[in-house]
Image (tube, rainbow, N blue to C red):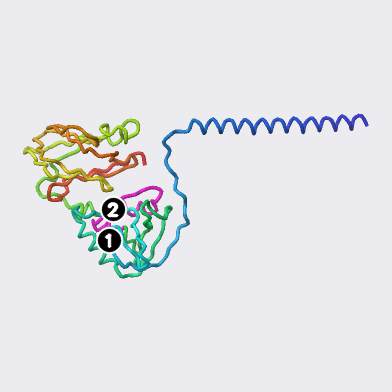
Amino acid sequence: MKIEVRKLMSTTKLKYISCSILALVIIGTTFVSSCAAEHEPKFTRPTATPVSIEKNTATISKVIDGDTVELETWKRVRLLGINAPEMGQPYHEEATNRLKELIKNKTVILESDVEDKDRYERFLRYVFLDNKNINVKMVEEGYANVYLIPPNTKYETELRKAENKAKTANRGIWQTSENLFGCTSILYFHWNAEGNDHNNLNDEYVVFRNTCSQSIDMTGWTVKDEANHIYTSPSFVLESNAEVTLYSGCGTNTRTELYWCNSGAIWNNNGDTLFLRDANGGLVLSYSYQGFG
C-alpha cells in the first residue's frame, strides 16, 4: 500500500513538474515573441491578400490605351505585367490602336494573379484570345515594356523573353535613334540611396557620358523608368567625352549636374529599366538592372 502511495505521489509530482515546465515554456515563448515584435524593422514590405486564381470570359467594349481596357459591364481592367506609353509619350497612339485591333469588341478570357485590383480599383488581369496571351503579345511587338509588381509575376518568364525579342528586332518603343544611338552611355547608376530612398533623393542618381567625338544637344531629351516617371531635359549640351549626373531630387542645374526634382524616389530597388530618348522620341539607350528582386 505504501508503494502505491509513493507511486501515486511520484506521478502527481511529475504531472506538477511537467505542467510547471509547460507554463514556463509558454510564458517564455510569449515573452520572446513580444520582444521580437518590438524590434521588428520599421520598413517591412506589405503582403498582399491572396485571391484564388480564376478565369472568366468577358467582352471588351473600349480600349483606353495600350494597357487598359473597359468591359461591357463598365468595369476597367489593367493588363498585368506590362506598361504601355501614356498620352503624349512616343508610341502611345500606336500601342492603343494595336490593342484595339487585337481585342476590341471581342470576347476574351481574363485570368487573375495574386492581387485582384490595383489602388485605382481596376481589375488586374492577363487577357487571352484564341489561347494567346495578349499581354505578352503587346510586349513582343514592341508596344509595351515589362512592368512587374510583385506578387503578380505569374508570366514573368514569358514577358521577359518577349521583351528581349522586341529589343533585338528594334520594334516599337525599342526603335533606336538614327543618329545618336551609341553616343551616350551610363557610367554609373546609383539606384539605391542610403537609408530610406524617399528621404535621400539626391543619393539616387545616374551618370551619363558622351562617348562620341561631337557634342550632343540634349534639350528636350527624356529619361523614363518602367513606370511613368519622366524627366525632360532643359536646354543643355553635353560636350564630347564629358559627363553629366542626373539626380532624383532638387538642386541647381550646372554643366555637370541636372536635377529631376521629383517628390519621391524614382528607381525601384527590386529592378527597373531606364529609357533615354532624344527630342524626337528615338531611343538613345536603355539600361536594365535586377536590383534586390
Camera-side residue: 278 or 75? 75
On the rendered image, what quadrant is the N terminus found in?
A: top right
On the rendered structure, is 25 left or right of 177?
A: right
For badge 1, the amino acid type reads Ile
On the rendered image, what quadrant is the C terminus found in?
A: top left
Task: Give neighbour class at mark 1: few <14, some 14-19, many 20+ (Cα, 10 Å).
Answer: some
Mark 1: secondary structure: strand
On the rendered structure, is 77 left or right of 288?
A: right
Report the label total. Answer: 2
Q: Is residue 236 above or below residue 164?
A: above
Q: Residue 274: x and y, percent? A: 24, 44
Q: Which segment is the magenta one? A: 136-162
Mark number displayed over residue 83 = 2
Q: Is residue 69 above or below residue 189?
A: below
- Magenta stretch containing residue 152, yes or no? yes
Q: Which quadrant would residue 27 be assigned to in this image?
A: top right
Q: Along the polypeptide, which appears first: circle 2 or circle 1?
A: 1
Residue lying at 41% horizontally and 58% vertically, measured from the top left: 112
Mark number displayed over residue 64 = 1
Q: Residue 56: x and y, percent? A: 42, 65
Q: Residue 250: x and y, percent? A: 22, 34
The residues tagged by marks 2 and 1 sit, at their Cα atoms, a distance apart of 13 Å
2 vs 1, front mark? 1
